Image: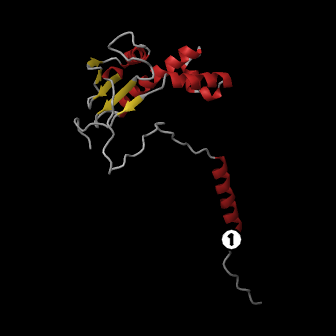
């Protein structure tokens, strides 16, 4: 009796491809993709290179200067400051002066906090100082609204009446933090 010649065994790969495709869809649907928000900064529009820069009339009294050099040393209003935690109180005193002290701002609407860094400034120090500057404003808003600064940062979840008062307060005391272009003095590119 003659034996039949058998061919090589075959595996049906069509169903394997279907399973792999279903697994891919499952992971795409169920996986949470992290999204970095970064710093929420609103940048000014790019100036027209054909036009001269506008002349800015500004009272030096209304400018609160914070400088951070490449060694992460801080100068606040020309004075060295080691403790970043003191920055909030200085900013709050400056903004809420209402013209009482001639060395501080005339009103909260005129007050501008200028934050200038160096190209060699450490990222963590920049974030720490910037957070303190913003935190000062959040503490001002929180004190006016009678809530905590953490609730002010998440004001979108608050009642509409609190949200309306917060919007009004932002017009009375605008958060004006100017971040100047970093200087090249301390190194870096």
In the rendered image, the residue lying farthest to the right is 1
Q: With respect to residue 43, does 86 lie above or below?
A: above
- Element under disc 1: loop
Numbered-mark total = 1
Q: With respect to residue 31, does 20 lie above or below?
A: below
The residue beneath circle 1 is: 11
Which residue is nearer to you in this view: 81 or 137?
A: 137
Q: Is residue 82 left or right of residue 132?
A: left
Which residue is painted at 54% across and 14% down in the image? 143
Q: Is residue 144 left or right of residue 21?
A: left
The crowding category of the residue bearing disc 1, from other C-alpha atoms within 10 Å (few below 14, some 14 to 19, many at least 20), is: few
Which residue is nearer to you in this view: 87 or 102?
A: 102
Which residue is painted at 55% across and 42% down in the image? 34
Name the quadrant of the N terminus.
bottom right
Name the quadrant of the C terminus.
top left
Q: Is residue 159 visible?
A: no
Q: How is the image coloured?
A: secondary structure
Which residue is nearer to you in this view: 173 or 180?
A: 173
Q: Position of residue 70 (x, y in %)?
A: 26, 32
Q: Position of residue 136 (x, y in %)?
A: 45, 20
Q: Is residue 73 visible?
A: yes
Q: Position of residue 94 (x, y in %)?
A: 39, 16
């Amino acid at each position: 009796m003659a034996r039949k010649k058998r061919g090589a065994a075959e595996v049906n790969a069509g169903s394997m491809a279907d399973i792999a495709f279903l697994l891919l869809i499952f992971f795409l649907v169920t996986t949470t993709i992290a999204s970095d928000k970064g710093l929420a900064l609103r940048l000014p529009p790019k100036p027209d290179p054909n036009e001269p820069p506008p002349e800015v009339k500004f009272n030096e009294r209304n400018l609160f200067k914070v400088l951070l050099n490449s060694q992460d040393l801080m100068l606040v209003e020309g004075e060295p400051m080691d403790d970043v935690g003191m920055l909030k109180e200085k900013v709050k005193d400056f903004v809420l002066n209402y013209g009482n002290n001639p060395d501080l701002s005339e009103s909260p609407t005129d007050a501008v906090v200028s934050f200038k860094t160096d190209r060699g400034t450490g990222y963590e120090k920049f974030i720490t100082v910037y957070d303190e500057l913003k935190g000062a404003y959040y503490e001002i808003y929180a004190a006016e609204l009678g809530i905590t600064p953490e609730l002010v940062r998440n004001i979108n979840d608050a009642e509409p009446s609190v949200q309306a008062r917060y919007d009004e307060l932002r017009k009375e005391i605008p958060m004006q933090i100017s971040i100047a272009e970093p200087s090249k003095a301390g190194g870096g590119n």
